[in-house]
Image: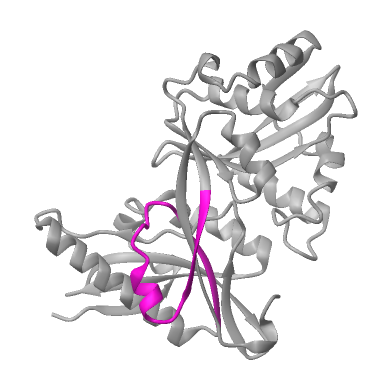
Amino acid sequence: MAYKIEKIKAVDIPNYINNKISFWAKPELLNLFAKRDNTELFYIIVTQNDTILSIMPILEKKKYRFVYINQAHEQYYTPIDFLLPDNQTLFSLQYEKLAILKLFAKYLKNNYFKVVINFEDNISDIRAFSWVGFTVTPLYVYKKNIINYSEEYLAPSVKPELKKAYKNGLTAKQYWDIKSCSNLLQSLSNRKNRPKRQTENDYQLFLNDLYKNSLCDMVLVCKDDTPLTFAIVLKDKVSLTLYSFVTATSDLGLKLNSGIFCFNYILSNYREYSIFDLGGANIENVAFFKSKFNCELKNYYRVEINKIPLLKNK
């Protein structure tokens, strides 16, 4: 029987499906993004014989008479979860996944004027999106195995930085206090981490909502009780992955690499997780900093299409 593809609201997802979908598809997470970005959460599902075979979340935005999707923040991924039967040959499984991906690609192209999506690195076959006219851009992210982490395996240049930080009395702790980091948060005003036209107070409320829903932690690095660096990590308890979500640093002229100190603390103190996603490695100096942790470089893909000339580059 042929596939059927349709869009549904989050409240219409069956409970058994909600228990199977990945972290980046969870409505409790995406509803907070929708509130932050003034978008609306929907799910596109592919079914056969009324059985859901695949599901993809979208955050939909309306501007004038146009409806579009723009999820290009580097710290945000869009998943496609497959719920296919296990009793298939490898060939038939790959063929079915490709057919479903092409359905998603056609649906997005036919129903939205603009689409910009970052797929997580587990979506490696993007041919279907190219075939229907999407631009596909390979991007990069660093990931680190937490389980066997040790400072011994860091790049040689990092060890003196850590030694200097310890000697100068830097401390790190898991501690939620967004207000004490307001000066550091201001540095995000011109970065992609915070959407345009969102006030600092609104952004703090968003981060607090993530914390209240047990979706994130803050690691704070201080010198004499003065915050130098903070990192907010999203906690994926499905795949046991930590995601570097927001980081901000101000060494106050002390020339101490509090960013390295902060990431070292995360890798050393979250042993209940398996992987630390350090975030994008697409800017040279950022990539160089993250590479010091001897991480694995992974590909992820951005797919986009724009049928609204006036919205290009916006």
Rendering coords of residue 152 (x, y %): 52, 14
Rendering coords of residue 8 (x, y %): 41, 74
Q: Is residue 307 magenta?
A: no
Name the outermost residue toward the bottom.
Answer: 65
Rendering coords of residue 280 (x, y %): 58, 48
Left or right position of 140 against 133: right
Name the outermost residue toward the top.
Answer: 167
Any part of residue 174 in sight: no
Camera-nearest residue between 10 and 314: 314
- Relative to 249, say whether 59 is above or below: below
Q: How is the image coloured?
A: one colour
Left or right position of 131 against 85: right
The residue at 54%/58% (across/down) is 30
The residue at 45%/51% (across/down) is 299
The residue at 18%/81% (across/down) is 2
Any part of residue 199 in sight: yes
Q: Is residue 121 magenta?
A: yes
- Relative to 14, say whether 223 is above or below: above
| Image quadrant containing the N terminus | bottom left
- Relative to 52, say whether 239 is above or below: above
Q: Quadrant of residue 164?
A: top right
Q: Quadrant of residue 191?
A: bottom right
Q: Where are the magenta residues, as a range?
A: 114-140
